[in-house]
Amino acid sequence: MLTQKPLVRWSLFGLACLLVIVIDMPIISLILNSFRSTAEILSSTSLIPAAPSLVNYAYVAQRTSFFQYLLNSLIMAGGGMAVSILAATLAGYVLSRFRTRVFRAYGTGLFLVQMFPVLLALIPLFILFRKLNLINTYYSVIIMYTVAQLPFATSMFRAFFDGIPHDLEEAARIDGANRLQSFALVVLPLAGPAIAAVAIFAFLFSYNEYLIAAVFLRRESLFTIPVGIQQFMQQYSTDWGSLMAAAVMAMLPTFVLFLFIQKYMMYGAIGSGVKG
């Protein structure tokens, strides 16, 4: 029996590694193909590059506006994430603590808005934003990202705040804190896992979003990464090597963010369990 347990563990570990490789095969193929030319990508049947090179990365870094696209994406995704977290935190707390008919109707309206396709509202919003001179600005995209993320973020914060005991706030108010102080000093520190989860959802949604950015941003200097990468695809040809190199470079910020948020979520879960 003792000799079988390590064998079972290694077998399960090997199976898990195989599943990870199969699931991540598109990403692995994308990374490997970014190290070879477009001609080799179209002609080769092997997954491993015959002569790996950094030509595609050099081309993307030196001869395209990739880093401008990246900066635009970070500004718009970060702005949408910050505004949605701020608004959803307050709205979720109010819906959790104040159970009135008005707030119940507001909560129901959030779900109805979430079911409404954004595509149907793009043309009226484009006309409205054009009259307000918001086309080709960061503000129009950040507003759209915030509105699109707000229903889900609010419902998530509401569910998390429902799980925090009211006794903690009452104890803080007995010590002299008002409701806003008890929310900021007691409830909000316990919301680390919810903030982390909403943050990564909001950032990834905004960072990968294409349609809204393509409609409201018509100037190339304001393109986000999804819109800018489309420039590698022309009418009669596609620069696959540079396209894949740009896609790999675009994945790096989200990968780093996920590593950071993952640690923060674990810390927040442990901290909230101790404080509760």
Image (cartoon, rainbow, N blue to C red):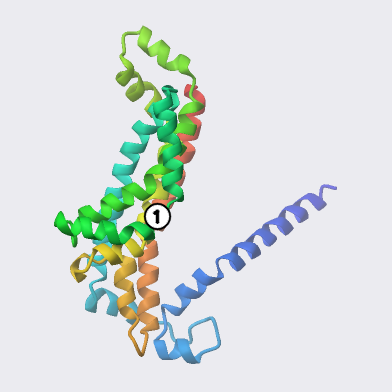
Horizontal and vertical percent position of residue 69 = 26, 66
For badge 1, the amino acid type reads: Leu
Residue 196 in sight here: no
Q: Secondary structure at mark 1?
A: helix
Q: Nearer the viewer, residue 100 or 204?
A: 100
Residue 245 in sight here: yes
Quadrant of the image occupied by residue 64:
bottom left
Please count the marks in the image: 1
Horizontal and vertical percent position of residue 2 = 82, 47
- Compared with 188, 127 (above or below) is below
Locate residue 171 relative to residue 72 in the image: left or right.
Answer: right
Which residue is located at x 46 percent, y 28 percent?
161
Q: Nearer the viewer, residue 110 or 193?
A: 110
Which residue is located at x 22 percent, y 66 percent?
68
Locate residue 241 relative to residue 162 in the image: left or right.
Answer: left
- Compared with 188, 260 (above or below) is below
Which residue is located at x 44 percent, y 23 percent?
99
Provide the residue designation for mark 1: 204
Horizontal and vertical percent position of residue 275 = 47, 22
- Farthest residue in the right direction? 1
Horizontal and vertical percent position of residue 91 = 36, 33
Which residue is located at x 43 percent, y 47 percent?
114
Quadrant of the image occupied by residue 268:
top left
- Compared with 105, 6 (above or below) is below
Q: Nearer the viewer, residue 119 or 196?
A: 119
- Compared with 122, 246 (above or below) is below
Classed neighbour count for the residue bearing mark 1: other residues with Cα under 10 Å, few (<14), some (14–19), many (≥20): some
Locate residue 253 relative to residue 266 in the image: left or right.
Answer: left
